[in-house]
Amino acid sequence: MMDEDDKLTFFYSGNPEEEVFKLIEKALEQREHYLVEFYNEFLIDVYMLLDKRKSRHVAIDWDNTISADKTFFKSLIFQLQDAGFKPFVCTLRAPDKENIEEICKILEKANIPIYLTNGKPKRKYMKSLGVKVHLWIDDFYPGICGDSCKILARNNIKD
Ligand SMILES: [Mg+2]
C-alpha cells in the first residue's frame, strides 16, 4: 500500500482506447495513483497529453514527474519498452554534466535517451531533432508548448 501523501493525480482526457493509455492506466491502478479526466490545475500532479497518433515516442519529464515516484516510472519505462514504445526523458534543465549524471544514476538500468532542452519549449525542441511525440507525461504543460497550442485544446485543457 502506498502512503496517501505519496499518491499522485494523473490527468488524461484523450482517446481512452489508445494502447499507450491502457498500459499506463493499468500501471497507475496497480500503484494506486489517481487518474482524472477533467482539467483542474489545483488537483492534477501529472498531465498525460496525446500528440502524434502514429508515433511510438513517449516523452517523460524529470522534475516532479519521474522524480515524484521513481519506482513507478522506472517500472513504467520497462513496460513501455516491452510494448514497443520508445520512452525518453525530456527536461527543461540545462544540458550540463551534473544534471545528466544525476538522472542517469536514478534511472540505473532503464537506459533511455535524455533530452535537456535548456528552457526551450519541449515540443519545438524535439521537432527540431526530428522526433515526433505520441504522448507527453509532464507536471508542467506550458513547458511543452507554451500556454496556447493545439495539443492543449485537443486534450481538453482550457484555461
Ligand atoms: Mg517538471
Image: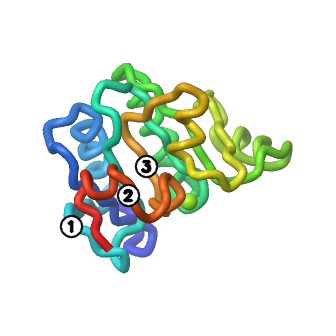
Ligand 1's quadrant: bottom right
Q: Is mark 2 within 8 Å of ligand 1?
A: no
Residue 24 position within the rendered picture, expressed as x and y whole percent measured from the top left: 31, 42
Of pointers 3 and 2, the one earlier in the residue sequence = 2
In the picture of the structure, the residue carrying the numbered disc 2 is 47
Which of these two is toward me, 152 or 101? 152
Label 3 to label 2, Cα distance in Å? 6 Å
Q: Given contact means CB atoms under 8 Å apart, are the residues at marks 1 and 3 in contact?
A: no
Distance between mark 1 and mark 2 Cα atoms: 11 Å
Q: Is residue 142 left or right of residue 12?
A: right
Which amino acid type is marked by label 3?
A: Ile
Displayed quadrant of residue 45: bottom left
Q: Are marks 1 and 2 in contact (CB under 8 Å)?
A: no
Q: Looking at the image, which is closer to me, 108 or 25? A: 25
Q: Residue at x 28, y 69 (%)?
A: 158
- Mark 2: give few (<14), some (14-19) or many (20+) Cα within 10 Å: many
Q: Amino acid at mark 1?
A: Phe
Q: Which residue is mark 3?
A: 137
Residue displayed at 39% across by 30% down:
80
Residue at image coords 49%, 60%: 146
Furthest residue in direction left, as rendered: 17
Q: Which of the two labelled residues, at mark 1 and mark 3, occupies the earlier sequence position?
A: 1
Residue 86 in percent (x, y) is at 46, 26
Helix, strand or loop at label 1? It is loop
Q: Is residue 130 above or below residue 101?
A: above
Q: Is residue 16 above or below residue 128?
A: below
Quarter of the image with the C terminus in it = bottom left
**Residue annotated with mark 1:** 38
